[in-house]
Image (cartoon, coloured by chain):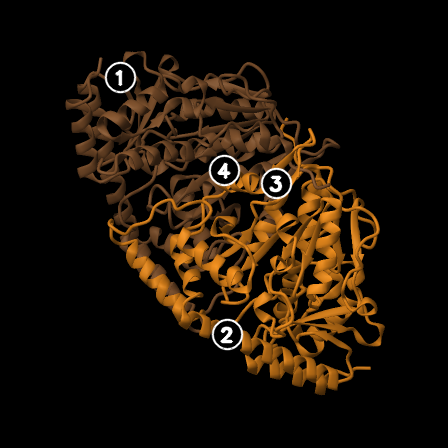
Chain colours: A orange, B brown
Amino acid sequence: MASINDNYLKLKAGYLFPEIARRVNAFTSANPNAQVIKLGIGDVTEPLPLACRQAMAKAIDDMGDRQTFKGYGPEQGYAWLREKIAQHDFQARGCEVSAEEIFISDGSKCDTGNILDIFGKNNTIAVTDPVYPVYVDTNVMAGHTGDANEKGEYGGLVYLPISAENEFTAAIPSQKVDLIYLCFPNNPTGATATKAYLKEWVDYALAHGSIIFFDAAYEAFITDPTLPHSIYEIEGARNCAIEFRSFSKNAGFTGTRCAFTVVPKTLTAKAADGSDVELWKLWNRRQSTKFNGVSYIIQRGAEAVYSPKGQAQVQELIAFYLENARIIREKLAAAGLMVYGGVNAPYVWVKTPDGLSSWDFFDKLLHTVNVVGTPGSGFGAAGEGYFRISAFNSRENVEEAMERITSTLKLG
Amino acid sequence: MASINDNYLKLKAGYLFPEIARRVNAFTSANPNAQVIKLGIGDVTEPLPLACRQAMAKAIDDMGDRQTFKGYGPEQGYAWLREKIAQHDFQARGCEVSAEEIFISDGSKCDTGNILDIFGKNNTIAVTDPVYPVYVDTNVMAGHTGDANEKGEYGGLVYLPISAENEFTAAIPSQKVDLIYLCFPNNPTGATATKAYLKEWVDYALAHGSIIFFDAAYEAFITDPTLPHSIYEIEGARNCAIEFRSFSKNAGFTGTRCAFTVVPKTLTAKAADGSDVELWKLWNRRQSTKFNGVSYIIQRGAEAVYSPKGQAQVQELIAFYLENARIIREKLAAAGLMVYGGVNAPYVWVKTPDGLSSWDFFDKLLHTVNVVGTPGSGFGAAGEGYFRISAFNSRENVEEAMERITSTLKLG
């Protein structure tokens, strides 16, 4: 008899975004004329940069001629893309990251889940609360947790609460943890990390032999020049951190699919016999065996992000979404809500008014003003009483949504 | 201290194709003027069908207009693609497979590895020998095996030998196995399966509650109308089989990346408490959590495979490679080699002459006539003494390689 991975049965009913989609679909089926504005899932809305489109169109032409046709590419990604990333995103910021340490993939969501493949079963794992749900769910699936309690917290995970009280920066744990997920600029709270704060984490990790999974998918939204874009701006991070990056939120690749993960060759973890094993070698083996690289066409599109025109077009996109975020913050604050984030990040994190639960506020916004956000409790127990509004939409929709909320919705 | 997945340390030195690449690179570095012809890795060489290129170019235009821009798509793939696949590849052949049962992915290699995520640790796993190495290596990584012996066989796996003696069709095992990998048309041997033979496997699986992983990546090469293209042509397969399909080898998508996996909703396996759990639900959860769908642009390219023009262009590609296979078979046979496969498959499986080992024959071909093939022993211990020649190359290269082998190489 074939048997299943029973850990899947520990997962709670629905991954957050499918549940949101379910409620929105139910509402729009019942109210077909409602003009629903979606500021929920962090999905971009504006056209792909022209430079990327032109590069992909040319790549399609390459595929039409056997002289320039591309079959299987390197599982790790093409050298021309890895080199541009290393140069532009790291070396230009003073980070020692080589092209060989960059692995191109089809998404950071995939990579943050798949990275667990190369780690053992007995690591103690820390996540912030609230947190991007994929970090937790993939650990549940891998059998790294016990069952969930009534608040949705899984046994065996170390939760580091973040809230207005600690300015959305988790305290360094007093206990020993082996794997730590950090995300800055933060999803969902929009909080950022200073170099001094990241240095505390790097020092902790070096002292304990821990590995930090640093999710920097939103680094392009950093406008404050004092904030680090990469954890490798912190001394010692090459010996304790893996970084995840994406083209989804800078160049609008959510539907185009390209991302990358940095695994420094200096990074090791322990084998059962106590020896130190290079994580680069394990991840390289994992990717070579279970992945076949990203489409040549898409990699050419990602490469164009680093062209002068691509850079200008990406900056324009970022500025556009950040202006949306500013409008959201100011309008909601003027309406009397407590708002956080949204300055160096595309997410505004709102305290729900009137003591409403996150899902009650979700339903109220959906049913009263037809605006979709994301319930904070969907990101973890400590997100209860908060709500995420995304700046990813057209200016018109953002303004209309804010107008509806501030004028129609009775708050406070 | 963070610890690694020690199972990775059981893996043998190199995945087959990187090892081939290493030897070829060493040879070409030492012999920069050698005109090496690669008939090794099963990688297509001819341009992408025009219909696919046109559809992708149009999709790029869609991405340039916010009205038609696509952000995150369904993790399972777009309905318009899943419906065409269900209709064309299954329903038109009398197979009861619905669009909802089809999961679009970026590769069959990925899917055949990832599928293990949803199964438990205590399944007994059977593979043929020789076999596509990814099936074995992903089981090693997942901790389903013991160490390898000196022949490269991993403890805990059930190996089903295939060779000329049993006409490259594995005997149905006498013992009970829970998960079985079958690949037809076969990689590496080029062998095919009759409906009667697959029926034996389906009956075995139904009797034992086993699940068959059916890899049909090469089904497009079937020209014999009596041979099944899908395991769902066999009665009962919906209750015991998952099928893997790819656009890599029919439409030349090895560098473009699109594939799909069929998980019937009627398929179950056992939870620890003895209950039956729908595998569709687990795979859907796995893909929703650890995958973000295939690029919209690429899915539009795959959709075009099902247009009348796309179908004609794919048929032309297949006929081209099959003619290459015919030339390889006939020339090698005329040169006195024992050849198998290559009729309903793009691979010709050759018995090495003069009792040479597979790698010795590899080195002899590379160094003497500068032709690259794949050592049979790289696919498993029982592949020793065999050699795979791929039909994926230009006519000119195939003819030149055969000319060199038959005229220059001293055989027998």
Name the residue carrying label 3. Answer: A117
- Percent from the top left, x then y, of residue A226? 64, 71
Residue A323 visible:
yes
| Mark closer to the observer (2, 3) | 2
Name the residue carrying label 1. Answer: B338
- Marks 2 and 4, Cα distance to the nearest angstrom? 36 Å
Q: Quadrant of residue B220?
A: top left
Please name the amino acid that badge 1 sits on.
Met
- Marks 3 and 4, Cα distance to the nearest angstrom? 12 Å
- Percent from the top left, x then y, of residue B40? 32, 32
Both labels 2 and 4 in a single chain: yes
- Marks 2 and 3, Cα distance to the nearest angstrom? 35 Å
Name the residue carrying label 4. Answer: A289
Q: Secondary structure at mark 2?
A: helix
Chain of the residue where label 4 is placed in the rendered structure: A
Please name the amino acid that badge 4 sits on.
Thr
Please name the amino acid that badge 3 sits on.
Asp
Q: Is residue A294 left or right of residue A15?
A: left
Name the residue carrying label 2. Answer: A315
- Marks 1 and 3, Cα distance to the nearest angstrom? 42 Å
Q: Nearer the viewer, residue A271 or A365?
A: A271
